[in-house]
Amino acid sequence: MRVNHVGEVCAQALYNAQALTSRDADTRMRFEAAGREETDHLAWTRDRLRELGDRPSLLNPLWYAGSFAIGWLAGRTSSRWSLGFVVETERQVEAHLAGHLERLPVADHASRAIVKQMKEDEARHADQAAQAGGRPLPKLAQWMMRAASKVMTTTAHRI
């Protein structure tokens, strides 16, 4: 659950930065709306961590800062590229959450409910960004995002 919480910290940073830098009012409103939903996810994962007797990642300030910088750069591009970044990010998160659902104990109903709802919300965010004109990212960018995500999830699991 700590990794999922870190993901929500990163989502806050990404959406905040992209909303802040977007030049298009409609795109900005999309980022702000998705960010509000991600705030719910952040609260759910934080509360579940407490229930499980665990703690957030000690590196959350670093995760936020790095994600904000990435979101800032994405937001400074065109709306189509920025939305494309959202599509790719949310698709990768959706895949991570699907894998997490497979590994969660069947009896952990609380965690499963949280992860299932987050997965549905992330898929919807990706679909909405694609429908709004998100442009597919180059394969190299997709690979770099997956690599960075692997580093983050591996590190966040421990620290």
Image (cartoon, rainbow, N blue to C red):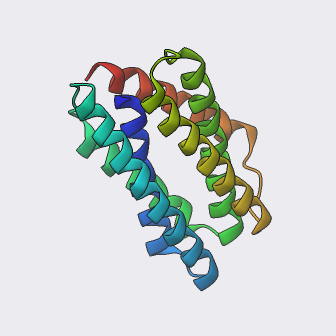
| Residue under the image location 41 percent in, 55 percent down | 40
Q: Is residue 98 above or below residue 20?
A: above
Residue 10 higher or lower than 143, as above or below: below
Question: Does any portion of residue 144 appear in the rendered image?
Answer: yes
Residue 42 horizontal side relative to residue 149, left or right = left
Name the side, left or right, on which 4 lies relative to 48: right
Q: Horizontal placement of 6 versus 126: left or right?
A: left
Query: In front here: 123 or 151?
Result: 123
Rendered location of residue 155, percent (x, y) = 35, 23
- Residue 95, compared with residue 90, is above or below; it is above
- Residue 87 image position (x, y, % from top left): 68, 52
Q: Residue at x 34, y 30 (%)?
A: 2
Q: Please tell me which residue is depicted at 74% across the width and 45% down the height of the picture.
A: 138
The N terminus is located in which quarter?
Answer: top left
Q: Quadrant of residue 131?
A: bottom right
**Where's residue 114, x and y in %?**
48, 39
